[in-house]
Image (spheres, grey):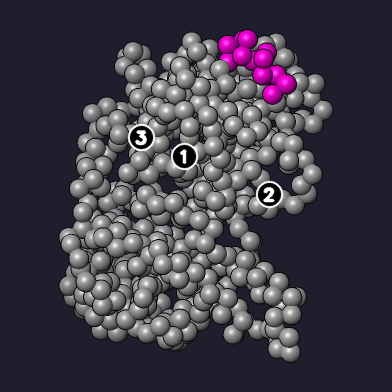
Amino acid sequence: MTKYIFVTGGVTSSLGKGIISASLAKLLQARGYRVTIQKFDPYINIDPGTLNPYEHGECYVTEDGAETDLDLGHYERFLNVATTQANNITTGRIYQNVINREREGAYLGKTVQVVPHITDEIKRNMRLLGESGDYDIVITELGGTVGDIESLPYIEAVRQFKWEVGSNNAIVIHLTLIPFLAAAGELKTKPTQHSVKMLLEYGIQPDILVCRTEHHISQDIRKKIALFCNVNLNAVIESVDAKTIYDVPLLMLKEQLDRTVLSKLKLPLKSDPDLENWKDFLGRLKNPTAEIKIGLVGKYVELPDAYKSITEAFIHAGAQNECKVRVESIHSEGVTEENVKSKLGHLDGVLVAPGFGNRGIEGKIIAIQFIRENNIPFLGICLGMQCAVIEYGRNVLGLKHAHSTEMDERTDDAVISMMEDQKKITLKGGTMRLGAYNCELKKGTKAYSIYGKTKISERHRHRYEFNNQYLAQYETAGMVMSGINPDNNLVELIELKNHPYFVASQFHPELKSTVANPHPLFVKFVAASLEYAKKKN
C-alpha cells in the first residue's frame, strides 16, 4: 500500500513547507523509494495562471501544460522527476469538480455540503497519485497556515484520511516556528504549542514537528516541545536557517527526519541515502573558482519569487561552471537610452526575462540594443525573445514601427503577432500555449552546439509568436532562426552569428533546470559570460 505524508504549517506563512517537503522526498528517494509530492492550495482560483506575479510569485508550468504553484518547481529541482496536473490542486478545482457533478445529477436528492462532499473530493485527489501504482510514498503539502478559514476543509480531509487508512499508513508533519526574542535572549516555544493545540482542536495529533529557528534548539527545549505537544523526543526536528535551500536535505539527514518518518510508517530503511552527487553539487556551489555578475532585466524584480526558476537555474549553471553567479535585478521601466550604459555596462551577461503587457517593454528593447551592439552575452526568454526580434527589426532591418500586436494592435510591422489558434479564444485561464512541445535545431548553429542534438522538447507559456511573414527579411539581415517547431513552423530559438552569445527562446528553459541536470542554455550562457568577464578584465 502507498504511504502518505501530510505537511502542514503553523504560526506564520513562508516557513518553507515546500523546501522541507522536497528535502524529505529527496532523502527518501536517495534511500530507494519512489516518491512524489503534491501541493494543495486553498485559494479559489482554478490555478495561478491568471494571478499577477506580485500576488503569487511565478507560475510554474509542467510538462503536461498545467499552470501550477511555484513549489512544484522546487519538487522537480530536488527530485529531478517531472510533475503533472495531478501534483497541484486548488480549492477552485475542488469546488468546480463538485459543482459540475451536482449539475450532472450525481447528488440527486442530497444537499451538497462541505462535509462530506468537498472533503470527499479532497480525499479523492489525495489518493490519485498513490493509486497510480507509480509511487511508494506520496507527500502532500497543504498550503496556508493552520487556523486559516480557507484551510479548514483540507485539515478535516486529512483527519478523515488518516482515520481511514490507519496511523501506520499516513502521518502528519507540522512545520512551525520557534522565534528568538532578542530582548529576552531566548527561544520561545509557546507559538508552537498554540499551533499544535489548534491542530488538536481539529482532531489531528501531529506525528512529527519540524521547528524553523534562527538558533540551534537545546535538548531542554526539545524535551519541552515534545512534552507539551505530545510527540516523541526524536520527532522534534530542528530546521535551522540555512545559507542555501540545497543545504536542507543534508540538515534533515543529520536530524534523522527520514529515519523517523520511515519508522512511523513501518517501512524499512533500505540502504543509506545515496547523496554523493548532491554533495558534489554543493561542493561546487560553495567553492567557486570565479565570480560573474549577470543582469536580470524584468518588470517584476521587486518580488524575487516572480523569477524563482530563473534564479535557481543560475545556481545550477553556476555550480556546473564552478562559478558564483551574482544576479543583479534591473527594473525594465527604469532603463532609458540615457542610463542604459550605467545600468548594464559593468555586467558580464544580461538575461531579459519573460512577462506580459506593455509596461517596461521599451526598457527591455533599449537594453537589448545595448547588449547586441556591445557584444555582451545575452539570453532572452519568451517576451525577452520577442523584444530581441522587435529591437532587431527596428535598428537593423529599418522597420521603425516593428512591434508586437500584444502591445500595439495597429502597428504597421507586426513582427510578433498572436498565434492563429489563439485568436478565437476569449477565456483567459489555462488557454495559452502551455506545456512541452517539440523543437528541431538546425545543425551548425549555436543552439545545436549547446544541446548536442537536433530534436529537443521544451515547455511553453505564451500567446504570441514570431510572424513568419518577416522570416526571410530577418534571415537575410543575419538573424538565425535556429530552432523551429516541426508541427506549425513556430520559431522557437533565435541567435546572431557574429556575437559571443546572443540566444533567445520562445520557450522557458528555466522550467527544466534541476540540480542533477542544469539546463544547457543556462550552462553555456554562464560559460560565455565567464569568458567575457575574463577578456574584459
Q: In this view, does 435 lie to the left or right of 264?
A: right
- The mark found on residue 208 in the picture is none
Give yes or no for contact between labels 1 and 3 (Cβ–Cβ under 8 Å).
Answer: no
Quarter holding residue 37: bottom left
Is 370 rendered above or below residue 430?
above
Does residue 363 appear in the picture of this structure? no
Q: Label 3 neighbourhood size at 10 Å, few (<14), some (14-19), many (20+)? A: many
Residue 147 placement (x, y as % from top left): 50, 76
Structural distance between the alpha carbons of marks 1 and 3 = 11 Å
**Residue to which mark 1 is pinned:** 510
- Give the amino acid at mark 3: Ala
Res 317 label:
3
Q: Looking at this view, is 175 or 107 the one in front?
A: 107
Nearest to N terminus: mark 1 or mark 3: 3
The residue located at (24%, 61%) in the rendering is 31
Residue 531 is inside the magenta segment: no
Do labels 2 and 1 touch, CB within 8 Å? no
- Residue lying at the far right of the rendered structure: 410
Amino acid, disc 2? Thr
Looking at the rendered structure, the secondary structure element under dot 3 is: helix
**Quadrant in the rendering for residue 364:** top right
